[in-house]
Image: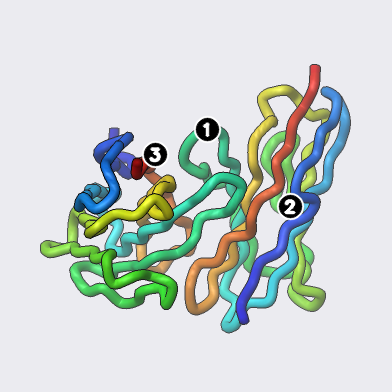
């Protein structure tokens, strides 16, 4: 059965901390892995990863994919309160599969 | 605004009633997806269209649910004889077939009393 598993389920950190969010997957006909940020409403796109070992960066966020070990990590450095959200990992294969998300809370 | 648009934003209904939601995708996107999301869970795939053709439906999708995209542009999702378990956020997303990035609407939150 195809699945996407994220860990931890929730995380509480202080402003300025660095966090690492994990996503592992077992998906038939893997095509890509995507990270989304979801605040009160719709998920907004962060990164798409298709190749192993190539880091994608956007400001304080970065992500990398390991297609051999079937996982990805999302790093956020120097966290801010505005980073508080649910971070969703999605994998495209025959369908589009989401994990349950990691809820990140950044305390001032 | 040229993003994905969903209407209504909120819907409250009584058990047993039928409801219909609408999604207008980004205009040049030929794929349209419907998802359901409940609290603490990631979006759960329901169905998707490429142009007007419904290519896939989740095995979990009850026959009370039906979706259409008659002209390959906007789509509707109808739920017949609603049950309290149908209460959720219904999200629509669109993409170009050659891309993997889905762009989401703000969702329709359904509450079945």
What residue is shown with label 1? A40
Residue in front for this viewpoint, B20 or A68: B20
Q: Secondary structure at mark 3?
A: loop
* Tag 2 residue: A63
Q: Please report the residue visible at 74 percent of the width from the left and 31 percent of the height from the top.
A: A105
Q: Chain of mark 3?
A: B
Q: Return the disc, 2 or 1, that comes first in the chain's sequence.
A: 1
Q: In front here: B52 or B27?
A: B52
Q: Is label 2 or label 1 in front? A: 1
Question: What residue did someone put label 3 on?
Answer: B106
A84 shown above or below A89: above
Q: Secondary structure at mark 2?
A: strand
Q: Check the image and tell me how it is coloured.
A: rainbow
Q: Is residue A13 left or right of residue A84?
A: right
Is residue A64 in view from this perspective? no
Marks 2 and 1, how far apart in space? 23 Å
């Amino acid at each position: 059965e195809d699945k996407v598993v994220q860990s931890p389920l929730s995380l509480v950190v202080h402003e300025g901390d660095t966090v690492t969010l994990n996503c592992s997957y077992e998906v038939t006909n893997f095509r890509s892995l995507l990270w989304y940020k979801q605040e009160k409403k719709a998920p907004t796109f962060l990164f798409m990863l298709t190749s192993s070992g190539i880091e994608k960066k956007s400001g304080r966020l970065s992500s990398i994919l390991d297609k051999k070990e079937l996982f990805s990590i999302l790093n956020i450095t120097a966290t801010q309160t505005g980073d508080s959200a649910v971070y969703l990992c999605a994998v495209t294969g025959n369908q589009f599969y989401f994990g349950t998300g990691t809820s990140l809370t950044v305390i001032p | 605004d040229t993003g994905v648009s969903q209407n209504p934003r909120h819907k409250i209904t009584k058990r047993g009633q039928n409801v219909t939601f609408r999604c207008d995708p980004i205009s040049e996107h030929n794929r349209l997806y419907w998802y359901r999301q409940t609290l603490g869970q990631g979006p759960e795939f329901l169905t998707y269209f490429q142009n007007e053709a419904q290519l896939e439906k989740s095995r979990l999708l009850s026959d009370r649910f039906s979706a259409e995209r008659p002209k390959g542009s906007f789509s509707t999702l109808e739920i017949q004889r609603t049950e309290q378990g149908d209460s959720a956020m219904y999200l629509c997303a669109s993409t170009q077939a050659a891309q993997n990035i889905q762009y989401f609407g703000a969702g329709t939150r359904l509450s079945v009393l």
